[in-house]
Image (cartoon, rainbow, N blue to C red):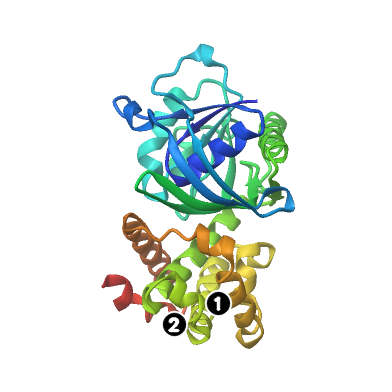
Amino acid sequence: MKVLVFGAGVIGTLHAWAFEQSGHTVALFVRPGHEARWQDGIRLELLDGRRGERTEVRTEFRPTVVSSLSAEDGYDLVLDAVRYGQVEGALPELVRILGRAPALLFSNNWGGFGFLEGVLSRDRYVLGLPRAGGVIAGGVLNGALEGGVVLGASTCGRSGSPEAESMAKRNLDRAVQLFQSSGFTPEIVDNMEHWYWTHFASTAVWAAAGAKAGGYDALAHDTRAIREALAAGRESMAICTARGAEVRKCSDARPFLAPSWMVAPLVRRFLGGEISRRMAQTRPEYVGEFRRIYDEVVETGHRLRVPTPSLDAYGPIVDA
């Protein structure tokens, strides 16, 4: 399959490497004038959890870099891997370069699809989120691929015309084929919009809890802090429910739906695991995005009159 990756950060780079390693033809799109940054490639130091294994990888990755596109390029899929705060600004540029290839949108979504459908019809995209992460520092990407990926059709459980539903399924099948052939295990969800909401709300909780604990590693070893996060997480899931989400169908909601005394030891073990630790996005450049995510979840809770005392208690820490 011929794949274009739009977004040369951690997520885009990790998946470009995984696809190319699996035999796909991959190009990484960078803005004109930024090609020189990739002249010597990038050092990858990652834990690869695909195919049910955990393999330590240390390698140099020199992707094919492009800064211009034409209708003749013939890509089968375009992976949009920009950050949440960059989506609305990047989407018009993505549509301009997309051609006829479907786009796999790999970014958080809390506000809905109104902005998206203003520039891209539902037969042109498929929805997803990665199970991967890490940091880039000093020319080295240190991170992890958990081995999974979450994917869903653009219809999000809503019926449409037979033609639109057929194209949505075709786009989803193409994305599933790409990831399966690259060693990933896709989790297919019926309503990706609801899954985005629960993932976004859980991200707000864990980011705020990490800030209060003094960092990811500190949180991973603090059972009391984890229990506080689970209480805030139950409130964040109540916000999602108030929006109409069926949170029990969303895997990221599960830790918040069980009694904290039961699940806290399991969460502590998960957070302290090597893949989770390596996936943590702990660079300073993520601070603004995590603060925005927290603020948007809290504001929605207040607007919907959902009681959120535990979630609100993180506010001064996040502000600081």
Residue 281 visible somewhere in the drawing: yes
Residue 113 visible somewhere in the drawing: no
Q: Is residue 208 above or below residue 8?
A: below
Secondary structure of the residue carrying numbered label 2: helix
Give the amino acid at mark 2.
Ser
Query: In the rendering, at what x and y percent does residue 37 appear?
Result: 33, 32
Query: In the rendering, at what x and y percent does residue 266 appear?
Result: 64, 77
Query: In the rendering, at what x and y percent does residue 269 appear?
Result: 61, 75
Q: Quadrant of residue 299?
A: bottom left
At 59% from the left and 68% from the top, the residue drawn is 273
Q: Residues within 10 Å of mark 2 (few under 14, many from 20)?
A: some
Q: Which residue is mark 1?
A: 234
Q: Which residue is mark 2?
A: 310
Query: Mark 1 and 2 residues: CB-CB less than 8 Å, in contact?
Result: yes
Give the amino acid at mark 1.
Arg
Secondary structure of the residue carrying numbered label 1: helix
Q: Is residue 194 above or below residue 2?
A: below
Q: Is residue 79 left or right of residue 182?
A: left
Q: Is residue 62 left or right of residue 160?
A: left
Viewer-side residue, 201 vs 157: 201
